[in-house]
Each structure stands twice: as structure tokens, then as C-alpha cells.
Image (tube, rainbow, N blue to C red):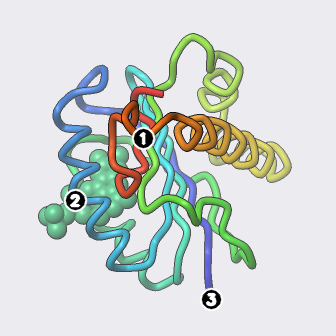
Amino acid sequence: MVIRYFYKSRSTYPHYTFHDLDIMRSALRVNEEKNINSFLLRSDSAYYQILEGEETVVMDLVDTILKDSRHFDVTTLLTHEIETRYFQDWALGMRVLRPADKQIHTQLDQLSADSDMATKHSVVRDIHRIATRYHQRDKALPPRKMLRSDRTRSLASA
Ligand SMILES: Cc1cc2nc3c(=O)[nH]c(=O)nc-3n(C[C@H](O)[C@H](O)[C@H](O)COP(=O)(O)O)c2cc1C
């Protein structure tokens, strides 16, 4: 069974730091190996991550991620079976939230385990829209202007 798992957590280190690069480095390798697709949003104080893949594989990885000291207060927002992966273009896509993302940022801040399902699903769709928008923009850049290889599919500086 393929599932989508969505959580939020508080980051141990404020802002985007080399710790985030370390996370990306191992996540790109591991997620690709495990056929997991993922998108990670980062604000100054929080992470919001969606993972998609085989249930047992995803939940094993979640166990590891939960114990990671680079974040704390992990709250599960959503776990459900899916037929189609939203994030199949990314082993790990990442975006640092900017002032332009104020609307989604506010929604993410307000999300809790108790939020209603419709709101949670709507936020996931919004994250997918954001991911796709910047992915399309990256793909449209002429090759010499590509700052990262397509494989990393990082949106960190988009
Ligand atoms: C917010 C956050 C998100 C993470 N996401 C992933 C992920 O998607 N995939 C992954 O393998 N590791 C992820 N990690 C890192 C894992 O907790 C762990 O360090 C890593 O899987 C170990 O990989 P290694 O085999 O290189 O030691 C994340 C860590 C944090 C703090």
C-alpha cells in the first residue's frame, strides 16, 4: 500500500544552514534508493515534510526522522493511502519559505493534528502547486543557468 505522510516539526537551528544541506544529501540518496518521494518546506523555525511511498518503507524512515536531533516537537498531520503520488518528480524537493509564501506559511503555522481533514488535504495540494510552479520555472531556465543538477531537484533558492 502506498501512503502519504505529512508532519510538521520545530527546527533546532534557526534559518537555513549547512544542517539542511546534510539532510538533503542523505535524503536524496536514501529516498531514491527506497523509492520515496518527498517535499520539505523550511521556515525560520519549522519544517513541514510530505513523504510518499510504500507504507512500511515510509514508516521505517519516519521512525528515523522522528529521532533526528535537528528538529523536535514532531506532529503528525496526515497519514493516508494514495493512488497517485503528488511528488513523483522529487526524491527530495526543498523550498525555504520566503515572504512571497506568506499565505501558505500562515496556513502551515495554524495546522495542528486537530485541524479538519479537508484543511489538511487542501494544504497538501497547495504545497504541490508551489512545488510544481518552481519546478517548471527551473526546467525553463537555459542549461547554463541551472545552478543545480536536475537530479537534486532542489528548490532551496527558488
Ligand atoms: C526535517 C528533516 C527531514 C528529513 N528528511 C529525510 C528524508 O526525507 N529522507 C532521509 O533519508 N532522511 C531524512 N532526514 C534525515 C534522517 O533523520 C537521517 O539523518 C538520515 O536518514 C540518515 O541517513 P544516513 O544513512 O546518511 O546516515 C531528515 C531529517 C530532518 C531533520
Q: Give x and y (percent) for residue 63.
A: 33, 68
36 vs 122, left or right, is left
34 vs 68, left or right, is right
Q: What element carries label 3?
A: loop
Seen at 28% across and 21% down, the residue is 14
Graded by Cα atoms within 10 Å as few (under 14), some (14 to 19) or many (20 or more), the crowding at tag 1 reads: few
Residue under numbered circle 3:
1
Residue under numbered circle 1:
143
Foreground: 70 or 39?
39
First in residue order: circle 1 vs circle 3: 3
First in residue order: circle 2 vs circle 3: 3
Q: Is mark 1 within 8 Å of ligand 1?
A: no
Seen at 32% across and 78% down, the residue is 33
Q: Residue furthest right?
A: 118
Q: Is mark 2 within 8 Å of ligand 1?
A: yes
Residue 152 in the image: above or below residue 79: above
Res 152 label: none
Residue type at numbered disc 1: Pro
Q: What's the distance in space between the residues labelled 2 and 1, CA to CA?
A: 25 Å
Seen at 47% across and 34% down, the residue is 95
Residue type at numbered disc 2: Ser
Could you tell me how many numbered marks the image carries?
3
Residue under numbered circle 2:
26
Foreground: 87 or 120?
87
First in residue order: circle 2 vs circle 1: 2
- Taking the image in four quarters, ligand 1 sits in the one at bottom left
Q: In which quarter of the image is residue 147?
A: top left
